[in-house]
Amino acid sequence: MELQFLGGASEVGSLGLVVRDQGRTLLFDYGLTPSDPPTYPRPFPSNVDAALISHSHLDHTGMSPLLSRLGKARIAGTAVTSEITDLLARDNLKIARLERYLPPYTHEDILALEGRFLPIERRGTFRHHGIEVNFTPAGHIPGASMFLYRGAEDLLFTGDILRNSTHLVPPAEMLGCDVMVMESTYAGKEHPDRAQTEKQFRAKVTETVERGGQAIIPAFAVGRAQEVLLALEATGLDVWLDGMARKVNSIYLRHPEYLANGKRFRRAVEAVSTVDSPERRRHAVKNAQVVVTTGGMLDGGPVLSYIGDRYKDPKSSILLTGFQVDGSNGRQLMDQGTLTIDGVTIRPECEVLKFDFSAHAGHSDLVQMVRDSHAKKVVLMHGDHREALADAIRGEVEVLLPENGHRFEV
Ligand SMILES: [Zn+2]
């Protein structure tokens, strides 16, 4: 079996993995890195028989509309992944127009993908021309799947994984395999205790409101905003939701089988006020106690309206909930205490804090997942510090740390 990363081998972003086995060619994920302008993986081979998308984060699915140009390939993932891919792809065309760069695909590609995407159940099996791939839940975000390809060897592609359950999603369900291709975002790093983090988060939100400020909570639209809403449920505060997360909510509500608790999620969504017009936004900017809104890294989106109104208010707070990539406004705020909006740099006087709501398995969970898989070989991908994890498992399994573009046998 021959493997080749088109992107995302040694970095978090633009993932794409080609697997060639017994005359078949498979592609796992095809993402982009949402920098400004975005960066893309290498082109895929034209003879792909099957393309499988693990979940609906941009670094895994962002380039999938291009797959519709593949002649006869089958394209598959869960229904949630398919619907959110469509939403993100349309949004990307809009961003490309606003930021004035050439989009990598067209509106026609998005429509063509929509027509060809084959939805597979949570624990379902994809079959096509002798190819068999079992789906198994990956935790992480609703609809996220691992793939077990039944080839010359059983190969498990993890996508992004979370071993614990969260408010939003049930945990990953590991399957045995010979070769495991595993994400390693948190190689060498552990998360703080989640219950403790949430307690501190709720206390800070409540404190902000009690001193007369607004708690502004930037959150990614896919997965994070929903997890935050569920974490805020117990506060009983006046919470507003703005941005694309609203559309993601309606997709999740249509697929409760992918949620930890569909009824609870519905209750949480119904308890928040939503911003669906400019008037409602004006009202929320002035009056909301708590706002959960995109963009999660403060590089655009409605969050800038809220910060623009409150940045001189020391009673308000900006509570970051996601990873802040180098070069993003969120990173700049954490490191230098400033934000650059439309070329103007401001220094918010609000309190700024970051909370770890990560949906990736931490280092020791990754090690445990390797053991649970009984794999003989582990290929580490999707991580900036893969060596730390490689060192921890090398005595037990053979470890490979490929680079993008390099073809290698497993
Ligand atoms: Zn992800």
Image (cartoon, grey):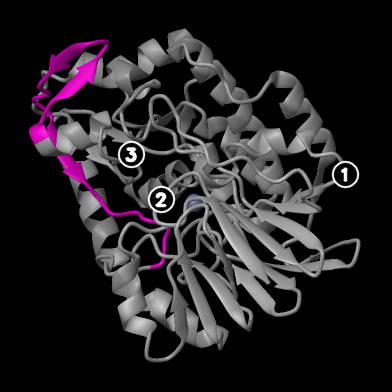
Task: Give yes or no for residue 359 being in the magenta stretch.
Answer: yes
Horizontal side of residue 237 vs 37, given as left or right: left
- Select label 3 or label 2 by which is in front: 2
- Separation of disc 3 and disc 2 at Cα? 35 Å
Please say if 182 is above or below 210: below
Mark 2: secondary structure: loop
**Disc 1 + disc 3, Cβ < 8 Å:** no
Residue 317 tag number = none
Q: Is residue 347 visible?
A: yes
For the point 62% across and 55% down, the residue is 54
Q: Which residues are magenta?
A: 336-361
Residue underneath mark 2? 12
Residue 72 tag number = 1
Mark 3: secondary structure: loop
Quarter where residue 26 is shown: bottom right
**Disc 1 + disc 2, Cβ < 8 Å:** no
